[in-house]
Amino acid sequence: MVPCLLLLTSCIKTQSPQKPNILLICVDDLRPELKCFGADYINSPNIDKLAAKGVSFQKHYVNAPSCGPSRYTLLTGLYGSASNNALFLRANKMEEGIKEIHPSMPEWFKTNGYTTVSVGKVSHHPGGRGGSNWNDSTIIEMPNAWDKHLMPVLEWEHPRGMMHGLANGEIRIKASDMDVFQTVEGNDNIYPDGAITDQAITQLRALTTNNENPFFLAVGIIKPHLPFGAPKSYFDSYTGVEFPPIEHPKKPEGKTTWHNSSEFRQYNLWKKDPNKDKAFAEEVRRHYAACVSYADAQVGKIIAELKRTGADKNTIVVLWGDHGWHLGEHAIWGKHSLFEESLHSPLIIHYPGMERKGATTDAIVETLDIFPTLCDLTGVEIPEFVRGVSLRNILEHPNTSGHPAVAYKNNATTIRTATYRMTLHKDGFVELYDHTTAENETNNVAEKHPKLVEELKNVLLSKMK
């Protein structure tokens, strides 16, 4: 006779533990000017707290210096068009059936049993839809990707209004009539990111209640994107704080990817030029910093809710900036260049049970690596088509070397190593900058190092194949 206990044990079906959840927080135009990245004058307590629990990639570089193509690489694991419409172009190819299109990152996790939800600006258009106001549900930026793709609009009327919105429902109609920066008394919900954060919290509660599947929740925070508007309390927090001088503030000589900051200059600047007016430059920098602190507060609310639900014990958290932003370096106010300031952005990864909490790494990595890393950390198969590599080994051993990072615009491509940046223009012109010197990206040394230029060209071409 089989003992009862043995019989019961043999009848119990062994359950495998649920795969880890994923919380991906995307922050628009966030340069790595945070306390946890060495900027002691910035108030970023919530991102700093995440960094203290995870690993901060101090040398993370995006693959394009604009929102659309940078998010394309994040969400597909592939190099792509340099256009802001890169994801819509991909969707058009899917609809036309011209050739097989590889699954996006959220679609890949969806097919592997995840519930996928996006809130806010995750792809280029907040909410992931096209049309004149970015709310046409027949034009989907990422087909098959999300079980839900949500964008609250409230008094800003539509996603396009939210994207460039200021306090209390102000919508950008004519950019020159909208102030480039603003502070208004009120709570976090007088600006669009308050509503995005509230919706993210609502979705977290739903995903952690009676949900049998692991979740992939992506939240896109808009600030500090232009125009620089945040509740006044965040601006006031910088009263008396001394900002360091702008590094290499002069317009570069010779051929580069410099531009005249047209995105920034389309707003009302009160006929002032921050490249000539130091006091105005200081105001711009402080309003940008206020927006960073406002975005940081939203990150804090989302992570606090994750902890409140208890799901933090089985959730990977990734904080990613979609590109950098010049604040006067090279006489640029904006992104869109192939200089360090446009391409260097924060990346922080935390996962349950990680051993190297609070570690930093100077390994060169790129946005393309996030897709395979999340697969590796969750036990989901890494698809053969992705171009990046898993960062798990660096997460476990932060002193491990990274790999060269590539980025591109329509007219040039660049590669960043631990010591150099080389930029190759379509007409063959080369910029080479030595990052072991104080000159950084102000002195083109390409003519002095022809052999190194050829070596870097070969690495660049092999990565872009």
Image: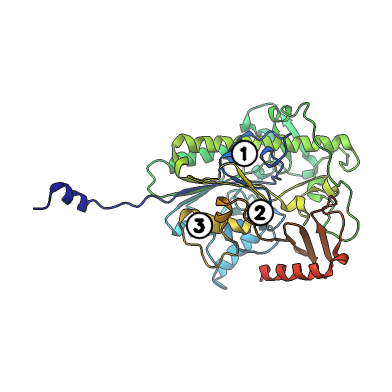
Q: Which residue is mark 1?
A: 47
Residue at horizontal 55%, vertical 51%? Answer: 396
Residue 326, given in percent of the width and then of the height, sits at 78, 47
Counting residues from the N terminus, which is met first, the one under dot 2 or under dot 3? 2
Residue 124, given in percent of the width and then of the height, sits at 64, 53
**CB under 8 Å between callouts 2 and 3?**
no
Tell me the amino acid under the disc marked 1. Ile
Can you tell which mark lies on residue 450? none
Q: Is residue 250 visible?
A: yes
Q: Is residue 29 left or right of residue 392?
A: right
- Circle 1 SS class: helix
Q: Which residue is mark 3?
A: 375
Counting residues from the N terminus, which is met first, the one under dot 2 or under dot 1? 1
Q: Name, please, the residue furthest toward the bottom.
A: 98
Pair 2/3: label in front? 2
Residue 39, given in percent of the width and then of the height, sits at 73, 38
Can you tell which mark lies on residue 363? 2
Residue 119 vs residue 367, the one in the foreground: 367
Tell me the amino acid under the disc marked 2. Ala
Residue at horizontal 66%, vertical 50%? Answer: 322
Q: Is residue 205 left or right of residue 165?
A: left
